[in-house]
Image: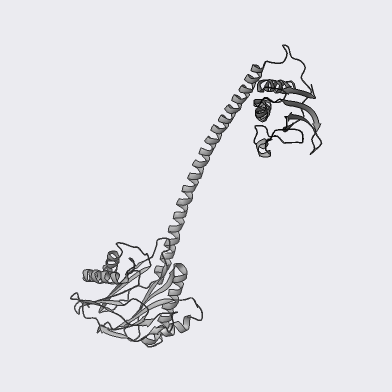
Amino acid sequence: MIPHSTTHHSLPGLRTTLRRLAHQLDLPVEQRARLALAVTQVAAGELGAGRSVTLHASREADPQDGEEVLTVRLRTPLAPRPPSMQALRDLPLPAERLPGSAAVWRLPHPGPPLPARPGGTPATTELLEEELRAAVARADTLAEDHKRLKHELAETNSGVLALYVQLEERDEQLRRAHGQMLRELEDALRPSPVRVPGLEMAVHYEPAGTDAPTGGDLYDWFLLPDGRVHITLVDALGHGVTSTRSALNVTHAVRTLALEGHPLESIVARTDEILLPFDRDLMATVLLMRIDPASGAFSLANGSHPPALLVREDGSAEFREVRGRGIGYPLPGSEQLLYDELAPGDLLVLYTDGLTESRRDPREGEQRLLEAARAHRHLPIEKIPGAIAADMHTVILHPDDTVALTVRRTREDSA
C-alpha cells in the first residue's frame, strides 16, 4: 500500500482515492477530512482546466527531527501561478512546497495498513457519513464547551461584580473615615470664636470636595494683651494636607509676631521673611484685622487677599480694600493700614476667594456677596456665614475651599 502513486483527471476520483487511502492507513477521521479538502483545493484549478494531477504517498524521514512520517505529495503540470506559501498555510490542512511538487503534506507516522475488513473498503458515501458524524460530534463538543465556558464566565463576572461592589463600598467607607479624620483634625486646629463683650463672631468653612475635606483656607482669632481682638485669614496655594500645613505655618507665625507686639503693618512682610527660607514653594494670601470691642475701631492689613465687606446696620455696604502682596509674592507686605469703625449693628465679612469665584467671575461674585450679606445681616450671627455661602454656591463652576467669617458689633444693651 505504501508507497502509493496514482494519476487523476477528476476531483471525485481524487477525493475517493484519498479517503480510501487514509481509511486503510487508519488516519483519524478529522485528519482524513482535512487532507481530502486540502488536496482537492490545490488540485481544483488544474483538474478544472482539463489537466491531470498525480498523488503520491510514501514513508519518509522528517528533515527536521529524522522521525518517519507519512508524506503526501501532489504533483501538477507546470502552472503559471503555483499556490503561494500563504495559500498553502491557509489550507484546511497546511502544506509546504518542495521542488517538483505543487504541495506536500507531512503527517504523523501511520500504523501498518489495517487488515482487510469483511466487505472490503467502505463506499465513499460511508466514508463521507463517517466524516460528517465526526464533524457533528466535534461541533456538539464545541457547543457544549462554549455553553460551559459561558456559564463559568457568567459566574466569574458575577463574582467579580460582587467583589467590585464590595471594594467600592469599602473604598467609600475608607474615604469617609479618612475625610472625617481630617475634618476632625482640622476642626481641632480651627479656634472657636473669641467671646468678648461688644462683639459677636461666627465662621463657615466648606472644603472644595468631600474627598479632600482639608485645604489651604484657614483662620485664626485671639485676644491681644491690650484687649483688642486679632483676626487672621489665610488662603494658601493648593488643596489637601500640604496646603493645610502651609496655612498653619502662616497662622502660627502671625500669631507669634502679633503676641510679641509687632505692628500690624509689618506682620505680612515679616511672616514672609520667617517662612520662605524653610518653604520656597509657599504662596499664600493674608488678611489681618484688629478691632477694639469697646469702640468698634478696627484696622486692616492685606497681602493679595480679597477685600473685606463692610455692611452698615442700615443696609449700605462697601468693600474695604487695602493694597499689598502675599507670602511668597515679590515684595510681600501690606502697603498701608486701613482704619474704620463698626457702629452697633454693623457687620464685617471676611472671606476667601472660594466664596466669590465659584462662577469664575470675581466682579459678579462680589456683587452677589454684597446682596447676600445685606439680606442676611439681621440673622443670628452663627447663621449668617452659612446663609451667605448657601446663596453664593447655588451654582459652582469652579469648586474651591471657602471660608466666610463675620464680625458684628453688638448694641450697648445686648453687650
Quarter of the C terminus within the rendering: bottom left
- Quadrant housing residue 348: bottom left
Q: Residue furthest top?
A: 119
Q: Position of residue 335 (x, y in %)?
A: 36, 86
Say which residue appears at 67% left-offset and 32% top-offset. Answer: 93
Say if 167 sits above or below 6 in the image: below
Q: How many marks?
A: 0
Q: Is residue 60 left or right of residue 301?
A: right
Camera-nearest residue between 45 and 353: 45
Q: Position of residue 200 (x, y in %)?
A: 27, 75
Q: Is residue 37 visible?
A: no
Camera-nearest residue between 186 and 369: 369
Say if 214 sits above or below 115 in the image: below
Q: Position of residue 120 (x, y in %)?
A: 73, 13
Say if 275 sits above or below 368 in the image: below
Q: Is residue 161 left or right of residue 285?
A: right
Quarter of the N terminus within the rendering: top right
- Quadrant housing residue 187: bottom left
Q: Is residue 147 visible?
A: yes
- Quadrant housing residue 45: top right
Camera-nearest residue between 355 and 94: 94
Say which residue appears at 77% left-offset and 36% top-offset. Answer: 99
